[in-house]
Structure formats: C-alpha cells, structure tokens
Image (tube, grey):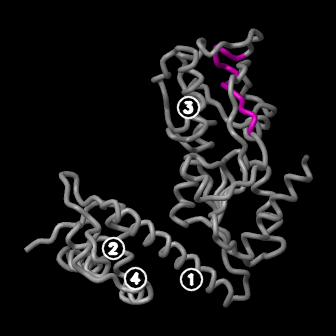
C-alpha cells in the first residue's frame, strides 16, 4: 500500500535531531541538490555517476529517514513538495559550507588565511570592490577569495543558498528583511548613455521617456532592481515597455553593444563616467524620475561571520567613510 504524504508524516515516529542528522549522508544531500536543480531523476543519476534505480533508492532512503515525501512526479518531471523545498535548501547550504570549508582548510594548511566568498553588484566594480579586495589581499595575501559579480537578485539567491558569506548589494524581496541584516552604504547615480554616433547623441534638449520607447535597448533581465526601475518609469509614463531589447547582466557586453550596435543602456555613473571621458560614448540628457534604493552590506541574520568576512566588512566601511 502506498502512503499519502500526510500518512507518511505520521506513520513514523520523529527522530531526535541528532539521530536524524546522523542518518543523513553526503550522498543524500548531493542527490537533493542535483534533483532540486534538474527536476529529472535520469539527469540526476548521470550527474552523480550512478544508475537511475540507485538514485531512486537514495531518495526513498532519505524520505524514510525524514518521514515525508520530498518530491512528486509531474508532467514536467520531479517537483519538490513544500517540505522538499526546505530540505533542498538545507542540502544546498550544507554542501556550499562544506566546499568553502575544504577550500579554506587547504589554504590554511599551506600557511594561508582560508577563504572568503563574496558577491557584489556592478556599481562597486570600478572603485569600491577592487580597492577593498586589494587591501584585504595586502593584509592576508594567501587568502582565497571567491567573487561573484552580478545583479542584486542573483546575489541574494546565492546568499540564500549560502553560496556566499556576504553580499554588497541590496535585498530584492520583502522576506529578506527577516532573513538578512542590511547596512546601507551608498546610492547609485544612474546614467543613460549611447555611442557618440547615435542619433540621440549631442542633443542639448532633455529627452523625455517617451522619446526612448522605440529605441533599441541593452537591459538587465528581470527581476533585477535596475530593470524593475526602468519598467516602472515606462509604465508610469503610460508607455509600453520597449520590446527591441537585448538582455544581459554583463557590463562588458552592454558597453560593446552600445558602442557597435546602435543601442542605448542605463548603468551606474561609477561604471560609465570613465568610458564617457575617454570618448566613444556619451551621456544622454534624460532626467531619471526615480532612483534605486541604497546598496549596502547584506549578511544572514543570526549567523556568525568568519574573521575573513569581518575583516572585509571593516575595510569596506572604512573606504566608504573615507570618500564621504
């Protein structure tokens, strides 16, 4: 007889936390991570280098240990249940912590300072971030630093999975207020820009948002905060959101498409100003009707930062104070 999820929950007497953790193995966590990412048992088995029946047996073992169904079969593959989502999240965080521990331990054995995994938005990439990392490496030269430069929504997802220890960015979801501590640092000034050869270049009259509706854009994909802000500006003006769009999170790709494909884009002043000064790009006279929230230091609530992370945070704070 097949037990329903509810029946399976009450069928087994709950194990004490220590006993439950003792029965969970690395293989269980690995399968949860892969199956949660792929939603396909066959692909999960291939990635783990086991047969599909063996992978299925591993999942059933874990469900028996926990006393609850973790995945359900759907027309699109294996989908985690509500409880399964929580368990998959735990598996990902545990595996990420283990990987950081292994890298840090190897570094320590070689006389280093361990490792630090940090994420940062692109607004910090031209000044704050490289200066902070340079100072950290000066103090701890053998430290291994894992850096993820991306949009805030991508960084917050990585922080939720504990793939990062901290983020220099901004929370992007209401639930983040309970999960993460946020220390504001600065605001970004946004510039609209184009190539010097663009029809909009050289205009002295201020552009209206309506002038840009038919333009070709390079934009960040949703749900990044900058993309949301631009979409809100078009909606507020009663204009349809542009559909002549290339979406990318790459600053390099954005700059090249603006230079060579006749497109326009919005990026932080900290990135664009030097490019404009060198020539080839020009700032367009658009008054941004809104601005992004402050970015800052984001860390998990209730977690204890490593000494490396504390050192990095202290350096970032000092640099922000020094520039006023």
Left or right of 118 on screen, residue 220: left
> Sequence-wise, which precedes: disc 2 or disc 1?
2
Residue lying at the far left in this picture: please name it.
1
Instruction: Mark 4 and mark 3 in contact? Answer it, CB < 8 Å.
Output: no
Determine which residue is flagged by label 3: 218
Marked residue nearer the N-terminal end (4 or 1): 4
Proximity of marks 3 and 2: CB atoms separated by less than 8 Å: no
Numbered disc 1: secondary structure: helix
Residue at 59% x, 39% y: name it.
225
Instruction: Decide which of tag 4 and tag 3 comes sooner along the chain.
Output: 4
- Report x, y in % for residue 37: 36, 61
125 vs 308: above or below: above
Closer to us: mark 4 or mark 1?
4
**Mark closest to the chain's N terminus, 3 or 2:** 2
User: Where residue 135 appears, x then y in whole percent?
Assistant: 83, 65
Dividing the image into 4 quarters, which one contains the N terminus?
Answer: bottom left
Q: CA distance from mark 3 to mark 2?
A: 38 Å
Which element type, helix, strand or loop, lies under badge 3? strand
Q: Is residue 197 magenta?
A: yes
Tell me the magenta residue range: 188-201
Q: Which residue is mark 1?
A: 102
Residue 129, percent across and down?
75, 55
- The CA span between labels 4 and 3 is 43 Å
């Amino acid at each position: 007889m097949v037990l329903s999820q509810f029946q399976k929950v009450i069928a087994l007497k709950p194990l004490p936390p220590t006993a439950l953790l003792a029965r969970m193995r690395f293989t269980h966590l690995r399968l949860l991570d892969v199956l949660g990412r792929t939603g396909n048992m066959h692909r999960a088995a291939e990635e783990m280098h086991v047969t599909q029946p063996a992978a299925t047996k591993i999942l059933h073992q874990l469900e028996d240990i926990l006393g609850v169904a973790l995945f359900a079969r759907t027309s699109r593959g294996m989908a985690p249940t509500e409880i399964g989502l929580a368990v998959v999240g735990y598996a990902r965080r545990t595996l990420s912590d283990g990987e950081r521990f292994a890298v840090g331990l190897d570094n320590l054995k070689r006389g280093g300072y361990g490792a630090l995994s940090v994420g940062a938005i692109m607004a910090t990439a031209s000044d704050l971030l490289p200066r902070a990392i340079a100072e950290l490496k000066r103090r701890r030269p053998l430290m291994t630093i894992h850096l993820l430069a991306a949009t805030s929504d991508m960084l917050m997802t990585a922080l939720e999975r504990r793939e990062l220890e901290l983020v220099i960015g901004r929370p992007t979801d209401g639930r983040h207020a309970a999960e993460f501590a946020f220390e504001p640092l600065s605001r970004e000034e946004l510039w609209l820009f184009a190539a010097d050869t663009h029809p909009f270049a050289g205009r002295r009259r201020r552009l209206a948002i309506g002038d840009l509706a038919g333009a070709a854009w390079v934009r960040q994909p949703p749900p990044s905060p900058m993309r949301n802000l631009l979409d809100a500006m078009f909606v507020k003006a009663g204009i349809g959101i542009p559909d002549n769009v290339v979406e990318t999170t790459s600053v390099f790709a954005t700059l090249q498409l603006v230079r060579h494909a006749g497109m326009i884009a919005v990026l932080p002043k900290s990135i664009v100003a030097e490019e404009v000064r060198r020539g080839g790009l020009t700032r367009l006279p658009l008054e941004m009707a809104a601005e992004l929230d402050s970015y800052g230091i984001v860390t998990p609530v209730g977690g204890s930062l490593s000494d490396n992370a504390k050192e990095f945070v202290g350096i970032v704070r000092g640099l922000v104070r020094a520039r006023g």
